[in-house]
Image (cartoon, grey):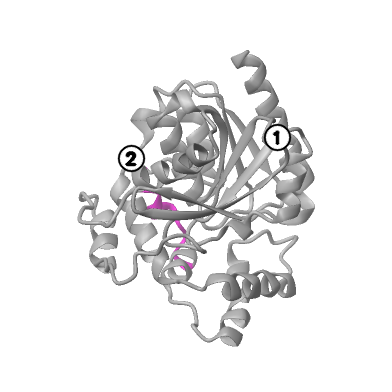
Amino acid sequence: MARAKVAEMELEYETFGSPDDPAILLVMGLGAQLIHWPAKFCQMLADGGFQVIRFDNRDAGLSTKLDGVEVDFVALIAAALEGREVSDTPYDLSDMSEDAFGILDDLGIEKAHIVGASLGGMIAQTMAIERPSRVISLTSIMSATGTREILGIPDESLALLLAPAPTERSAYLEYQDQYAIWCSKKYFDANLAREYAAASYDRSHYPDGSGRQIAALLASGDREPDLAEMNVPTLVIHGRDDRLLLPLLGQRTADVIPGSNYFLVSDMGHDLPEPLWPVVVDTVLSHLRNSVSEEE
């Protein structure tokens, strides 16, 4: 593990593979920690000939947390639902994008492949929009373009997303069963979900950060006009069973980004279950290698 200082942030990160290989920066989603990119998954990518970097976003894991900085979450959600501008947030996706570039700076990496999941996909898209010269390729997994995507979330999933999870450890672990609603139906394992939750809870349980990260998402608006002008090799991956961000949002992302490829994965929900890692990793590695060839 290492820490990078970016402006007022300190960001925890870890690398896999050789620093002499092209870099892949993995960007995780809402409230999630770097361990939500499992080490075995990271090693599979590294074994493909890449240096893999996973990190904690601000307000998550062991990175800097903005303790005491409050947001009027109800007002922000209401503004988003009504199509009004969302403002007065502590930070936005551009700030989180700069954090991610700061990790690359700390490692002396000028260009990297950026792979983001869910909110991490939105951050990754922002990186490709704002600093395309530093992005060799973009992979956006189970994500969306920012066009009022909250309206596309099924009611039961939105209610779960916004509901406060239990704070006591044992109750929190039992609560993981609730997330089956948007996970891969074929592969959801309640016991395994509790194991992951225990590791996450013990490393850094910090639900307050999720509210500020959602605020950052809402404040960042619609990326579609910029994505439509982007010239970065892009792969969009989405699960057919995703009941949080519906597959049509992945399709829309691919439709907007010129020349992008869309991979709809059967039996995948809003998660990355281990049985699907081989097909996902192979697809990502193929995209990365093609992107390197095009750049050369």
- Residue bearing the label numbered 2: 222
Q: Which of 54/290 is in front? A: 54
Q: Quadrant of the N terminus?
A: bottom right
Please give the name of the residue rendered at 43% of the width and 55% of the height, measured from the top-left corner.
10
Q: Which of 286/82 is in front? A: 286
Image quarter of residue 178: bottom right
Q: Which residues are magenta?
A: 147-156
Q: Please, what secondary structure does the residue beneath circle 1 have? A: loop
Residue 209 lies within the magenta run: no
Query: In the rendered image of this protein, does residue 24 appear above or below residue 196?
Result: above
Image position, residue 186 (x, y; %): 75, 60
Q: Which of 286/21 is in front? A: 21
The mark that comes first in sequence, 1 or 2, is 1
- Which secondary structure is most common in the magenta stretch? helix
CA distance for labels 1 and 2: 32 Å
- In this image, 35 relative to 93: left or right? right
Which numbered disc, 1 or 2, marks the residue closer to the eye?
Answer: 1
Q: Residues within 10 Å of mark 1 (few under 14, many from 20)?
A: many
Amino acid identity at mark 2: Asp
- Residue bearing the label numbered 1: 50
Residue 91, disc: none
Image position, residue 23 (x, y; %): 62, 34
Amino acid identity at mark 1: Phe
